[in-house]
Amino acid sequence: MLNDVLLPAGLAPADAVLIVIVNVFASALTSAFGIGGGVLLLTVMASVLPPLAIVPVHGLAQLGNNVDRAWMTRAHCDRPVLGAFALGAALGALLIAPLVVALPVAALQLSIAGFVLYLVWGPKPPGAVLSRAGLAVVGAVTTAVSMFVGATGPLVAAFVNRLHDERRRTIATFSACMSVQHGCKALTFVGLGFPFADWLPLLSLIVIAGVLGNWFGLKLLNRLPESLFRTGFRVLVTVLAARLIWQALR
C-alpha cells in the first residue's frame, strides 16, 4: 500500500533505492571532476524505468542536482556565459526541438561525440565558436537534442572547459548552464503532459541524495590539484564520447 503512494506504478522499491543511491555517487562525480554523473544516472535509469519516463525523470533529477551545485558554487559562475547559454536554451526548447526530432538518434550521437572529442583534444576552435553567439547556439542545439538523447552534458562541459582555466569556475558555470537546460526540458515535458506528480516522492529523495553527493564532491574538488582535475576531466569526457559512438554504431 505504501509503495503505491510513494512510487509510480511499475517501479519496484529495490529499483527506486538503487536510483537514489546511485545519484549520491553521480552528483559527487560531477562535482569533483565536472562531468560523468548525468550519464551514470541515465544509464541506471534506462535499465529500470519505463521507456517514456527515462528522459523526463532524468531531466528533473538533474535539474535538482545542478541547481544545488550551482548555488553552492555561485561565487565562481561566469554570468555572461550563463546569459548567452540561457538565451539559446530557451530558443532551443521552443523552436529547434521539432526539427531535431526528425534526425536519426545515431546521427545525433555521432555528431555530439565527434565535436566533444574535437573540443577536448583538438586545436582551439575559432573565436566565433566560443563567442557569446556561439554559446547561444550551443545552448539552443544541446537543449533540443537533450530531449531525445538525454546526454548532451559532455558537449556543454567541453565548451565551458575551453573557456576557463580554473576548476571551480568550470564547475560553477557548467552547473548553472545545465540547470537552465534541464529547467527548459522540464517545462517542455510539463507542457506535453508528463505526469510529474506521480514521481515527486521519488524525485524528492533523488534530490536529497544529490545534495549529499554534491557536498562530498565539492569537498574533494577543493583538494584536487588543477592538473589532476584537467586530466580527470579529459579522460571522463573521452570515455563518455566513446560511449556515444558505441551506442550509435550499435
Image: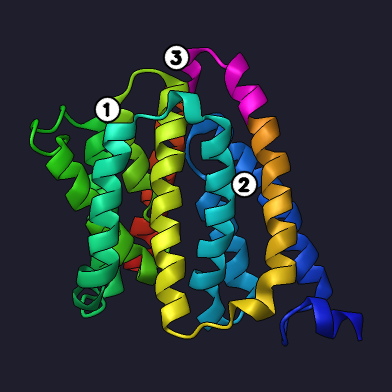
Q: Position of residue 78 (x, y in %)?
A: 35, 29
Mark 1 nearby-residue class (10 Å; few <14, some 14–19, many ≥20): some
Q: Relative to the observer, which residue lies in front, 45 or 130?
A: 130
Is residue 97 positioned above or below 218 on the image? below
Q: Inspect this view and state whether residue 33 appears.
A: yes
Task: Please name the amino acid that badge 3 sits on.
Answer: Ser
Mark 1 and mark 3 lie on one chain; the one further toward the N terminus is: 1
Q: Relative to the observer, which residue lies in front, 49 or 190?
A: 190
Q: Is residue 79 magenta?
A: no
Residue at numbered disc 2: 26
Please tell me whether mark 2 or mark 3 is closer to you in this view.
Answer: 2
Residue at numbered disc 1: 163
Mark 3 nearby-residue class (10 Å; few <14, some 14–19, many ≥20): few
Please tell me whether mark 1 or mark 3 is closer to you in this view.
Answer: 1
The quadrant where residue 30 appears: top right
Q: Position of residue 70 (x, y in %)?
A: 51, 38
**Residue located farthest toward the right when viewing the structure as drawn:** 1
Mark 2 and mark 3 lie on one chain; the one further toward the N terminus is: 2
Q: Quadrant where the N terminus lies?
A: bottom right
Looking at the rendering, the stretch of residues picked out in magenta corresponds to: 218-229
Residue at numbered disc 3: 227
